[in-house]
Amino acid sequence: MKTAKATKLDLLNFKSLPIRTFWITSIAFFLCFFSWFGIVPFMPDVVKDLGLTPSQKWNSIILAVSGTVFARLLIGKLCDKYGPRLCYSWLLVIGAIPVVLLGLVQTPFQFLVCRFFIGFIGASFVITQYHTSIMFAPNIVGTANATSAGWGNLGGGANRLGMPLIAAAVVGFGVAEAEAWRYAMIIAGVVCFLMGLVYYNFTQDTLDGNFKALKAEGKLPKTKKDEVGFLEAIKDYRVWILFFVYAACFGIELTVYGTMDDYLQNTFQLERVSAGNIVLSFALMNIFARTLGGFFGDKFGSLKGLRGRVLFLSVILAAEGIILSVFSSVNGLVLGIVFLVLFSLSVQMAEGATFSVVPFVNKKAIGSISGIVGAGGNVGAFLAALLLKSKSAVAEKSAIIASEGLGAEAVKSAQAAAASEAVSSGYLIIGFMVIVASLLTLAIKFKTVNVEEEASEFEAEFATQSV
């Protein structure tokens, strides 16, 4: 008898295969993001140790999100062909290599190369979304996708606490403090490797078994239908709209998260520790904010069908763009924090809402579509980072020239003010682009058959579980 998809997110029901899969894939995703951004808390040490220039530091940020674009595009297609279990296991095992090597680098070039290849483990997001998409019924799939993604994204913030704690622990064992960041990265890589073994041994591809066994039994096609699915995905205009939409939410979250420390210091004259704690709080909202996006996507889907999911996505994305635009012109710290919290809530809800729509675009190519849309996030981060880097670099250079001869403190103050103004104008431009993406979302249409399939699938899954 066919095993039923889960119709609710019962997190403590460990006997349920979908729930076990949810936990394992979420933890794997968390560890990947923890390692992906694990070097961020140590960047002052890295700059000092390796002698990175400001340009090399910016390039390392851009490279870290660039590598993920190619990995996400590829991994979605591989999931459709080989299944999420093998893809995740190999991604964790192979992805652990550049994480470990980052702890061994001796030159800026080696550092940049490792940061590029570490970005590949950011493709873990696609596999997590694929695996939860095929384990949960339509009424709850948006919530399940959003929660697993949000808890995984949390790794990108938790490393601000976790990595320094690991470094402090190794110092306690007699390692020199200047070398602690290297050992922390090596440990993170080893943990990723071990998680790859866990994923291989304790998960399965689908509710009915692994892809390899199902193909041998004739329950999955051995033909090139997976390639047909990928071609269908890249020809579907809705996929590319969602690509742009995810660039406008997850891509912007990555960029804002990566630039906010300096912006808060330059704009509100905060200490680095205070600014870092505010940004950490922003990241920790992934515990619930992204889940809310998936939850409301499912609720609007229940009320208005697939069109309801799209409408909610458009509204929350517009809210994100408006809030970021207003935040860019705020000068008071308290009001700035209020708008930063609102931005955090809206951007993460938009991410959850995006993947409450993705599973219904083409159920024969969920992996390929998840990969393309997921890659959109990193393309958005890449372009936004380039925009902010170009504006900031020009403004800072002009400020330094204009204040030359006035003393080190005057130059530093002028440079900070110029950087703040440049990034502020960049945030405003990005906010307008997000609003454009929200309007574009309304062009997503579904055939009547898709709406009927969603309703009938939920009814069938609910009936199976009731029996």
Image (cartoon, helix red, strand yellow):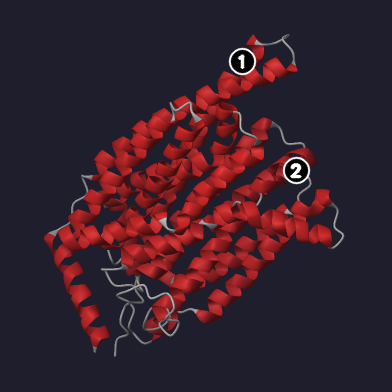
Which mark identifies residue 381? none
Residue 208 at what x, y percent from top left?
36, 83
The outermost residue toward the front is 334
SS type, badge 1: helix
Q: Is residue 463 left or right of 170 when viewed as pictured?
A: left
- For disc 2, the neighbor class at 10 Å (few under 14, some 14 to 19, many from 20) is some
Image quarter of the C terminus: bottom left
Residue 423 at what x, y percent from top left?
51, 28
Give me the C-alpha separation between circle 1 and circle 2: 27 Å
Q: Amino acid at mark 1?
A: Ala
> Which residue: 22% across, 58% down?
300
Q: Is residue 326 left or right of 41 when viewed as pictured?
A: left
Q: Is residue 426 left or right of 396 when viewed as pictured?
A: left
310 vs 263: above or below: below
Q: Amino acid at mark 2?
A: Asp
> Which residue: 26% across, 45% down?
314
Residue 67 at what x, y percent from top left?
54, 49
> Which residue: 36% across, 74% down?
135
Residue 149's image quarter?
Answer: bottom left
Which mark identifies residue 399? 1
Between 230 and 272, the one lying in front of the other is: 272
SS type, badge 2: helix
Between 425 and 189, the one lying in front of the other is: 425
Residue 273's image quarter?
Answer: top right
Circle 2 residue: 45
Residue 186 at what x, y percent from top left?
72, 60
Specify whether residue 10 is in view.
yes
